Amino acid sequence: MGMTDASWARHANPWSFWTRVPILALLALAVWSRVWIGWWCLVPVAVLIAWALINPRAFPPPASLDNWASRAVLGERLWLARKTRPIPAHHARRAMILSALAGVSLIPLAYGLWALDPWASFTGAMLASVFKLWFCDGMAWLAADRAAEPGAASGQQTWTPHSEIVNSSAGSISDPSN
């Protein structure tokens, strides 16, 4: 289920970003709920997975990209397109380290959910969330650095992945075909 330019524009809505943040903690709670509701725990798990897939398309494009969450999404898009348009090494290094730390944080979460250890579950979920948000902060920084590149000043348009154009002075997404 790839993301089109339109779905990336919708995902840049801060509501989309912030309603995704608690998904991991809620997913952990849903898995933990097997203790109370047995196999019915798969219902909230399925709902959360569906929400994670639908979320980037659930909100309209934001009126402005002049906020941290929108910049984080734009930076993530730049990160994903780094093979066709390289990003500065310091951004790539930071993103790789934080992604690895978030991934490693899933180990205590998985163990905690398997062994029903609340501290391991809590620690894993919180560390993974913190590292993901720190990663997003780096993506916002990447988007800000890209917007500050020559050609992006004074309201000129600057490139972002997949032919999307971001007007850096107005902070809005525009269609390059217009």
Image (cartoon, grey):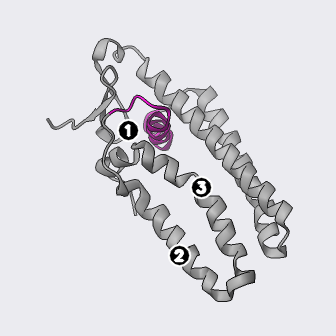
Mark 2: secondary structure: helix
Is 5 or 69 nearer to us in this picture?
69
The answer to whether residue 2 is magenta is no
Mark 1: secondary structure: helix
Mark 3 residue type = Pro
Choose mark 3 or mark 2, whichever is in front: 3
- Against 106, is 45 above or below? below
Label 1 Cα crowd, 10 Å radius (few <14 / some 14-19 / many 20+)? some
Q: Which residue is mark 2?
A: 46
Choose mark 3 or mark 1, whichever is in front: 3
Mark 3: secondary structure: loop
Choose mark 2 or mark 1, whichever is in front: 2
Give the alpha-carbon distance from disc 3 to disc 1, as whole Å.
27 Å
Give the alpha-carbon distance from disc 2 to disc 1, as whole Å.
31 Å
Is 36 or 12 nearer to us in this picture?
36
Q: Is residue 122 left or right of residue 96?
A: right
Q: Position of residue 17 (x, y in %)?
A: 48, 47
Q: Earlier in the sequence, mark 2 or mark 1?
A: 2
Return the mark for residue 161: 1
Q: Is residue 176 left or right of residue 17?
A: left
Mark 2 residue type = Ala
| Residue at x 38%, y 38% (from the top left corner) | 161
Q: Earlier in the sequence, mark 3 or mark 2?
A: 3
The quarter holding residue 125 reads: bottom right
- The residue range painted magenta reads 64-85
Q: Earlier in the sequence, mark 3 or mark 1?
A: 3
